[in-house]
Image: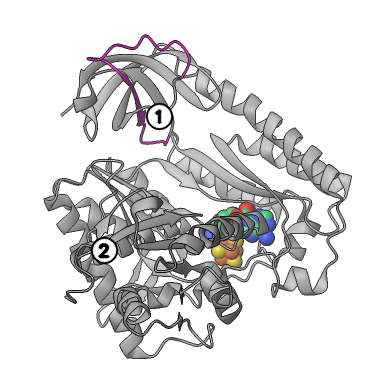
Amino acid sequence: MQSEICNLKLVIKSFGCQMNKLDTALVGSSLTKAGFALTDNVKEADVVLINTCSVREHAEQRVLSHLGHLKHIKESRPDLIVGIIGCMAQRLGEKLLEHEAVNIVCGPAQIPQIANLITEAIEQNEKKLAITERIRKPAPQHDSDALEEFESACRIEDKAIPAQAFVRVMHGCNKFCSYCIVPYVRGPEVSRPPHAVIDQIRKLADAGIKQVTLLGQAVNSYEYKAADKTWSLADLLAKAADIEGIDWLKFVTNYPCEKYFNNILRVMAGSPKVCPYLHIPAQSGSDKTLHAMNRRYTAADYLALLDRARDIVPAIAVAGDFIVGFPGETDADFRATVELVKKARYRNCFIFKYSPRPGTTADKRLEDTVPPEVKQARNVELLAVQQEISGELSRDFLGKEVKVLVEGPSKKPHLNAPENGASPQLVARTAGDWIVVFNGPASLAGQFATVKITKTSPLTLFGQLTSPVK
Ligand code: SAM
Ligand code: SF4
């Protein structure tokens, strides 16, 4: 470890998806090992790293406005080192390095180099760029070995949520949905070796982790050809379910396709550890729009998958994503999406307004025809339809007892919050990923408990603690 680095204070800010949060945890853990001290306070930091997202323009704008703020701080503290990591670093590379506030630009595949990049930026007083030049080419073996070693060695427990951790099972994406930047910034799909994933989960279990969420952009495409057999996500889940200490396994996000679908659901049906929760974005209910999105299914195919999922796992909770205002989306296309949402009966949906991403097929070939106010109106309408459904589904829980894994004290007060010091309001989740809020001792964070549901809202169940489970 470089003596220069000892005692340097580091802030890491994270924008974006779960995959980014995992990268943030990996970088934080590796830099702590290298001698940095993590802080939340930019004023006392020597180094600020921003982990960025490129999925929608808005996410990038937030980072740019944050950089404006850091540029201002650097006027009085020119020694402050600012590094950009993640998808925006890979997408904008050199251009981002030209920003006055930026010292380091480091792509997702280069995060194992981050400690060295910081040291070099300080010692050589130079800007540093580390990104993949040809992102769709398979990485050279030594680079993927370095990434795997880094991934396996770092501690990735989520400090903010005790007893839970995320484990990446694959990098990249090969689906090329026409609107999506991910394949161009995260590279081709590469599944991690099953033994590395399983070893990592075993170590997490030894460290007290009870819930592991397996991550991949299209996690059900996980496929690893070993000498003796080809591993699918179903095999991985079955193996992980054998690990003592791990009680709940979740996996996100699924691409709607046949391959391995039944096998994954059968493992879910057969193991109490594999949570009955399926995040499977449809993106649209119009076949014309789905085709233009390069999603390789029709609305009928998608609904048939959901029917099958509910046949195999009757208690399954399903979540979805939708994009409204995709180029060429007519009122009739949008109505088809509303119909699909009504039929799918999701527990919840994430709804996004189409945001053109430079370099994607949709941006190159299709005009962003839907006016912002129409996108907004469709977003609001679809949310209202989903709220209604979530409200109905949540009311089914009234009077029932649910098992939850407690995350910790609630950050914001919810309905009916009789607070007292010994019994603050806690947030927890069920196996089906429902959010449950109840009063109980803060020491329950990271523990299982049972809660009797006494009140519901579309996104949250409220209740009373009946007993800690273990
Ligand atoms: N791989 C996952 C999948 O396919 O479901 C998630 C990818 S992305 C990080 C999460 C969501 O962002 C997508 O499901 C999609 O709804 C949305 N999204 C992706 N690109 C978008 C774009 N250009 N504009 C608006 N929303 C977008
Ligand atoms: Fe993007 Fe489609 Fe891959 Fe998801 S599956 S990351 S939406 S290209």
Q: Which quadrant: the N terminus?
A: bottom left
In the image: residue 64, left or right of residue 107:
right
Picture quarter with the C terminus: top left
Q: Residue at x 30, y 77 (%)?
A: 119
In this view, 442 is above or below 61: above
Asked if residue 37 can be seen in this view, the reply is yes
Tally of numbered tags: 2
Of all residues, the one furthest to the front in this rendering is 76
Q: Which mark is residue 427?
A: none
The local secondary structure at tag 1 comes to: loop
- Does residue 188 show up magenta in the picture? no
- Name the residue tied to disc 2: 8
Q: Is residue 432 magenta?
A: yes
**In this orientation, which residue lies closer to the viewer: 303 or 139?**
139
Lower position in the chain sequence, tag 1 or tag 2: 2
x and y, in percent, of residue 299 in the image: 70, 51
User: Main SS type for the magenta part?
Assistant: loop
